[in-house]
Image (tube, coloured by chain):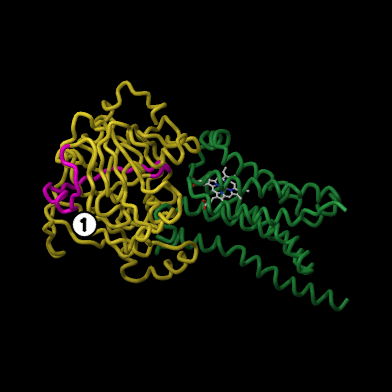
Amino acid sequence: MLIRQKDDVRSSDITAEAVYLSRRDLIKAAGIGVTGAVISGSIGSRAIAAENGPVGKIMASVTKSPLSTAESPNTWTDITGYNNYYEFGTGKDDPSRFAVDFAPQPWRVKVSGECNKPGNYNYEDLVSLHALEERIYRLRCVEAWSMVIPWVGIPLASLVNRFEPNSNARYVSFKTLHAPSRMPGQRRRILDWPYVEGLTMAEAMHPLSIIAVGLYGRELPNQNGAPMRLVVPWKYGFKSIKAIAEISFTRKRPRSSWEQAAPSEYGFYANVNPQVDHPRWSQARERPIGAGLFAGKKPTLMFNGYAEQVASLYTGLDLRKNY
Amino acid sequence: MQIDTSLSNFYRLTKPLILLLGLLPLLILMLGAFNITDHGLGANPIEKLLHELGRWALKFLLLTLAITPLRRWTGWNWLIRYRRMLGLFAFFYAVIHFLTYAVLDQGLDIAAIAEDIVKRPYITLGMTGLSLLIPLALTSTRGMVRRLGRNWRKLHRLVYVVAIAGVWHFYWQVKLDTLEPLFYGLILAVLLLSRWRPRR
Ligand code: HEM
């Protein structure tokens, strides 16, 4: 079992969401926000669960990582109320509303394929052996918006090493849980469930790739992919698969869900690249979430600003063809 | 005539009411956008505005197109009195939808907007719809209706093109979940088919 401390103790070196509590959250806490909530509730349904401020158990002994960005993170409300997670609906506020009862624990992960240690692992056995790190990463969605998110997680490489992939393993593929009774979005065939994603072994072993299990020093909220999800910050958000139930090592390149759904629009690599547009919209700029109505867009950076660390993974690869 | 004056009183009363109702969606969005209580428009307020305004433009277009079949089915000819206002609301919401895109979303970057209009088929379609609505709005006055005579009806058939462009624009803009634009498309199809009469 993960040893968790009670809410009254917190490790002081992790990012406290209270620091980022904005004026409007305080106003809301005082109950003045009710009219606004009622009015806008009539425009479109709102993310009730996300509105009440940080929830979830505080995680013990999380250390800061030098790989974090210095940019200040988005609010808890934005990160947990504006999600693309089609397993819980295609609207941005669907996940926060329909993942409330998801109950991620107990959780098991099936590991298979080209490795020496396949099997069914408990969540605790997978995560508790590793030191938790806070990684504040930029997230760039393929829809041309972006956030900064204080994840808590473990390096994917250290997890992968425990399964001892053999020399045939060229790719790692991941699958999300398939449980339409608990994931109502899976009752409509928007995508070919379960969601599948994959990385090359080199990408998976890269120090920036993590398995996230927390947010803002707390256990990962259901709408953000609880209990464990991938985070690959130099790729578009859809690569960072949520609620991982299966990990497999393969010789052949897995076909990811969005690639299957629209191969001309979404590729296997999906590296953030301002020079290669989505067929229907430009990827040159992005809208930073939380900047307000008049902030404008900002330029998107190659590999989402992580070029220095990851560009060498792709030398010789035509990124226009391998989008 | 006696009946006529009471009827025109009725219109005098109900028209402002409908005017206010038509402005209500905008008012609610503005409250969300500028209220200090905020979060009314959520994490991505520009997208929210853009989407809500676009949907209202389409809803008013479909309402406008519903008047004629409704008249036919119910015999309520007085409905025609409200059609111009509904059509102008469609135009009004399409214009602020476009302004939201041009000013808030694109920051009035003319080059980027021009590139979008040329390169992105769904924007091309939206722009086509909006451009065609302009002559319709300009010729919606009583004087223009009279002046154009039979040509007025011909010109205003363009509204069918606008509605198709609007729904198609919506459909092409969606990432994968096409349920909602298809629903609008279904309503439009019903409204268009209801106009079709086999030749006698
Ligand atoms: C007859 C005129 C128009 C109608 C009826 C219309 C309607 C719509 C509708 C229904 C949506 C989708 C809303 C949603 O997803 O909830 C939409 C989205 C959008 N429209 Fe329009 N529109 C029109 C004209 C325009 C014009 C002239 C432009 C710009 C030149 C434009 C740009 C956009 C953009 C950028 C989006 C959102 C795309 C995104 O979020 O990815 N539209 N419009």
Image hue for chain A: yellow
> What is the magenta range?
A116-145
Q: Residue at x 63, y 54 (%)?
A: B186
Nearest to the observer: residue B87 or residue B122 = B122
For the N terminus of chain B, the image quarter is bottom right
Image-quadrant location for residue B11: bottom right
Q: Is residue A131 magenta?
A: yes
Instruction: From the image, tell me which residue sits under label 1.
Output: A218
Neighbour tally class for label 1: few under 14, some 14-19, many 20 plus, Cα within 10 Å? many
Q: Residue at image x 62%, y 67%?
A: B20
Q: Residue at x 82, y 55 (%)?
A: B143
Looking at the image, residue B95 sits to the left or right of residue A35; the answer is: right
Shown in green, the chain is B
- Judged from this view, the residue extending furthest toward the top is A316
Residue A151 inside the magenta-drawn segment: no
List x then y, in percent, for residue A221.
28, 57
